Image (tube, rainbow, N blue to C red):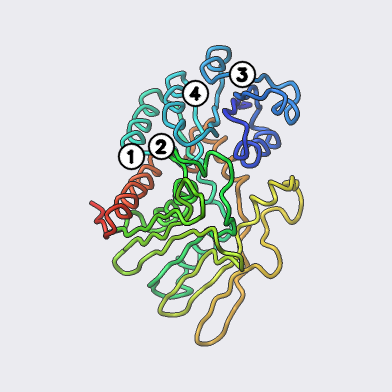
Amino acid sequence: MTISTLVVGFGYAAKTFHVPFLTNLPDFDIQGVVSSDPAKVNGDLPGVVVYESLELALTAANFDLVVITTPNHLHAPQTKMVLEAGCNVLIEKPFTLNSEEGEALVALSKQVGKHLCVFHNRRYDGDFLTVKQLIADGSIGNLKRFESRFDRFRPTPRQRWREQAGPGSGIFWDLGPHLIDQCVQLWGMPNAVNAHILTQREGGEANDAFEITLFYGTHFAQLGSTPFEAGPTLRFALYGDKGSYKKHALDPQEEQLKAGLSFGDPHWATTPIGEDGVLYTEANNQEVITQSGDYIGFYQQLAEAITSGSPLPAEAETVVPVIRLIELAIKSSQKQSIVQVI
């Protein structure tokens, strides 16, 4: 079975994170794109039908899968529309802007018998897979502190919807879901949340920095992002009673996708020389080879779920807790106090 696919939106997310897999994996066939710029779409996808609106596309043709890559505030209503039309959905994160909507969409997907998957590709980052293994095999002993960051040097705001005022805009809604989701994947829901969500850049309209602490009883997780990191970017740090681990630089898959690197290239999804993490113990310091990332595996697992009913790579039901923690973090930042997770 080839999965007939509609892509909704044709901006950075669609072109970077979705179209390469949809065009290179034999399981998928892009049958349409919803965009206001047909020339742009057909420049990359010659001959593909371009629809002016999602409503028109769903009326004009039948699709097995709809991939939604539009601005965040459109995710929930468009997902509802697609599910009601009888299509499976892959939705960019955050898939809703509140947990009630998330729960309603999960219930709707079950009601209509269609898959609802959230594009939490960072579950398949090589460095995160490595961190999971280090925690599981006891390399650092009992974990006491966990750090996870997405820092950049972007001191000047850009003219794009993610950085303009509006629902779902700002760096916290952009990167926060990834960092929080990884913690939920590792340990589930924390006991409490403390958050500071800030707008620090001159002329900034949306939040551009955050520091979030999730308290798990035996350890805590510190998550953050700043637009003012001009030096080496710390990605992960683990601190335990047998040692610690630090990893700098981001997973390479996004940059490789932007550069158009072939999936068959021997360097695909492999961490560049000099960017592996280091495990520090009393006995010695040891470089830890980073596992290869697997965004291809995300899409392959999605295809298997649609064609044979196997588990999704990121079932929406597993992401509702992430939206709930985002809500609690916003509440904590507004109240300037620790918020308990009930």
Q: Amino acid at mark 1?
A: Ser
Q: CA distance from mark 2 to mark 3?
A: 24 Å
The residue labelled by disc 1 is 99
Pointer 4: residues within 10 angstroms few (<14), some, or many (20+)?
A: many
Q: Amino acid at mark 3?
A: Tyr
Q: CA distance from mark 2 to mark 1?
A: 7 Å
Nearest to the observer: residue 40 or residue 298: 40
Residue 191 shows in the view: no
Q: Nearer the viewer, mark 1 or mark 4?
A: 1
Q: CA distance from mark 1 to mark 4?
A: 22 Å
Q: CA distance from mark 1 to mark 3?
A: 31 Å
Q: CA distance from mark 4 to mark 3?
A: 17 Å
The residue labelled by disc 2 is 96
Given contact means CB atoms under 8 Å apart, are the residues at marks 2 and 3 in contact? no
Given contact means CB atoms under 8 Å apart, are the residues at marks 4 and 3 in contact? no
Residue 196 found in image quarter: bottom left
Q: Is residue 98 above or below residue 221?
A: above
The residue labelled by disc 4 is 87
Q: Residue at x 42, y 27 (%)?
A: 77
The residue labelled by disc 3 is 51
Residue 126 found in image quarter: bottom right
Given contact means CB atoms under 8 Å apart, are the residues at marks 2 and 1 in contact? yes
Going from N to C along the chain, the mark reached first, 1 or 4, is 4
Drawn side of residue 300 relative to residue 110, left or right? right
Given contact means CB atoms under 8 Å apart, are the residues at marks 1 and 3 in contact? no
SS class of the residue under badge 1?
Answer: helix
Given contact means CB atoms under 8 Å apart, are the residues at marks 1 and 4 in contact? no
